[in-house]
Amino acid sequence: MIINIMSKQKRISPQDFLLQYLHELDAVMKDNAIRMGVNRTLYGFIFKYGWFYKPCRLPKKYEFGKLHGCFDNAFDLMLNHKILTYCEGFAIAKGATDAIEHAWVTDGTGRAIDPTWPMGGVAYAGVPLQKMYVVSTTVRNMPAEGFIDDGKNNYPLLRELGDKPKEWLEETGKGIIKLK
């Protein structure tokens, strides 16, 4: 059972809630991953390569994109600002009670720069992806969609490519705390 972040019975930090959420879904989805023939779940992938990112307000030099367009919004910011790295994983929006699959960018300092949620998020956990990997996958999949849970390409990061991080992991985009 997933504990609601706002539950009166047990209040936990957004970061702890997100970690628990990912662990619980990983356990539930392992059988499904085996049936699909993938090496790991989306959640297991996030655990293996993911980081927590520090929520921050969108800096004034960047513009918000479309609501519900996180993959495109993060992609556009990454393309237009050389210093930014595309990140994908899960996040909790300010005022929300559940985590969702989400994309944002980071500037190499561990901050989650979110061009989608005007009020921002309270917790971010994800994986930084190389610009070349994101661009080449987007060209194949127009428009941009999730790169980790990429069903259009038969889930390459959840299969063998996930074991070759030199081909997609952006080392300079790491967050503030490694996931456990």
Image (cartoon, rainbow, N blue to C red):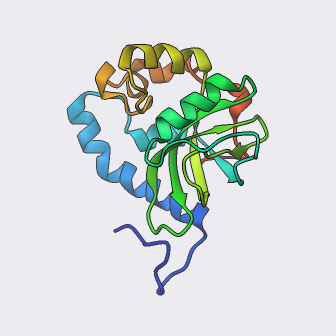
Q: In this view, does 83 lie to the left or right of 22?
A: right
Q: Nearer the viewer, residue 167 or 130?
A: 130
**In the picture, residue 21 is in which quadrant?**
bottom left
User: In this picture, is 16 found above or below 101?
Assistant: below
Residue lying at 48% horizontally and 86% vertically, measured from the top left:
8
Q: Is residue 35 left or right of residue 63?
A: left
Q: In this view, does 106 lie to the left or right of 101?
A: right
Quadrant (top left, top right, bottom left, bottom right) of the N terminus: bottom left
Is residue 47 at least partly visible in the picture?
Answer: yes
User: In this picture, is 149 found above or below 55?
Assistant: above
Residue lying at 39% horizontally and 28% vertically, measured from the top left:
158
Residue lying at 47% horizontally and 49% vertically, measured from the top left:
67
- How many marks are shown on the rendered structure? 0
Residue lying farthest to the bottom in this orientation: 8
Q: Residue 86: x and y, percent? A: 60, 31
Is residue 166 at least partly visible in the picture?
Answer: no
Residue lying at 48% horizontally and 36% vertically, measured from the top left:
71
**In the picture, residue 42 is in which quadrant?**
top left
**In the picture, residue 83 is in which quadrant?**
top right
Q: Residue 108: x and y, percent? A: 76, 34
Residue lying farthest to the left in this orientation: 35
User: In this picture, is 21 found above or below 135?
Assistant: below
Q: Residue 136: x and y, percent? A: 49, 13
